[in-house]
Amino acid sequence: MAEEKRLKKGQEAFKIYKEVFDRSTLLTLYTLINKGYIDEVHGAVSTGKEANVFHGVNEDNREIAIKIYRVATSEFRTKWSYLISDPRYRHVTKNPRKVVNLWAQREFSTLKTLFPKIRLPEPFVVYNNVVVMEFLGKNGLPYPLLKDTGPEDPEKDFEVVMNAVKTMYGEGIVHADLSEYNILVYDTLYFIDFAQAAILDDPRAEEFLLRDLENVRHFFSKYCDVPETENLLKEVREWKNM
Ligand SMILES: Nc1ncnc2c1ncn2[C@@H]1O[C@H](COP(=O)(O)OP(=O)(O)OP(=O)(O)O)[C@@H](O)[C@H]1O
Ligand SMILES: [Mg+2]
């Protein structure tokens, strides 16, 4: 696209953000626009506790999700405690901007490791507190959450989730916030929201795995018979050692 046109679109996007984000976030977005990672910005998809997700289009005309982690959030202490427990980020300082940037990087790095081994959005770029990834949905409408649709085929869907947990574990990763709130439904199930995902060297990894399995079990047991959490845990560990 001609530089001039892109800049114009970028400036329009810039206006939308103006009231919502701090100056440094605006500069980050502006850089991503100038580099073509973001070409058009459409509406907000979600305003969560720690991040805002926008729908947009990139230079290649692909729909993108733009996840913008807010610097000022009540979740700061939680993020920080997760980071210092992670051998990759142990030396993080308590600077809120640095913490939030590492948080975004951490999500991107996990997406990179796991794509396309499990169904998740293809990661495109991370810059400061912004992650740009494939948009899971069509024409700005995200696929619905599993918590809203319920499983179409409970046994089969449960197996899809267990297979994803095993694949992640095999890659040395635990999602650590796995639940029907972070699974989207389309032709199959898609997994999102990876910033809190831990590596197995993290002393809390096993605790997170147990919690994930408990969440999954709790949800699916409303629809079908599922093994006890203890057995699920065994299944995951044995699968890794195979
Ligand atoms: N790649 C994507 N494609 C389509 N929609 C997405 C994508 N990523 C996130 N979303 C939408 O944005 C919502 C919030 O995303 P996510 O769970 O990653 O952020 P969060 O910070 O955990 O938000 P929350 O506090 O609401 O849980 C999702 O429920 C989903 O509807
Ligand atoms: Mg979420």
Image (spheres, rainbow, N blue to C red):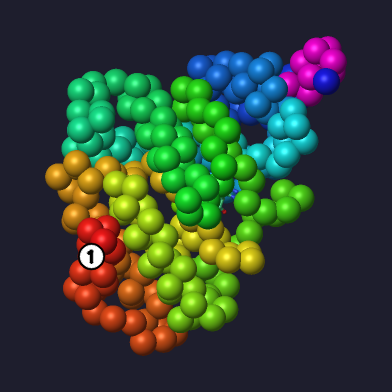
- Residue drawn at (55%, 19%) of the image: 28
- Residue drawn at (58%, 66%) of the image: 188
Q: Amino acid at mark 1?
A: Glu
Under tag 1, what secondary structure? Answer: helix
Residue 170 percent location from the top left of the image: 32, 53
Neighbours of disc 1 within 10 Å: few (<14), some (14-19), many (20+): few
Q: Is residue 53 above or below residue 8?
A: below
View extreme (top): residue: 4
How many dots with numbers?
1
| Quadrant occupied by the C terminus | bottom left
View extreme (bottom): residue: 225
Q: Of residues 132 and 159, which is closer to you in this image?
A: 159
Q: Is residue 105 magenta?
A: no
- Residue drawn at (63%, 64%) of the image: 186
Q: Is residue 183 above or below residue 27?
A: below
Q: Is residue 233 visible?
A: no
Residue 119 percent location from the top left of the image: 53, 55
Left/right of residue 16 with respect to residue 166 in the rendered view: right
Q: Of residues 240 and 96, which is closer to you in this image?
A: 240
Q: Of residues 115 and 211, which is closer to you in this image?
A: 115
- Identify the residue position indicated by label 1 in the image: 238
| Quadrant occupied by the N terminus | top right
Specify the quadrant of the image occupied by residue 218. bottom left
Q: Is residue 9 magenta?
A: yes
Specify the quadrant of the image occupied by residue 20. top right
Q: Is residue 201 visible?
A: yes
The magenta region covers: 2-10
Left/right of residue 56 with respect to residue 24 in the rendered view: right
- Residue drawn at (57%, 16%) of the image: 27
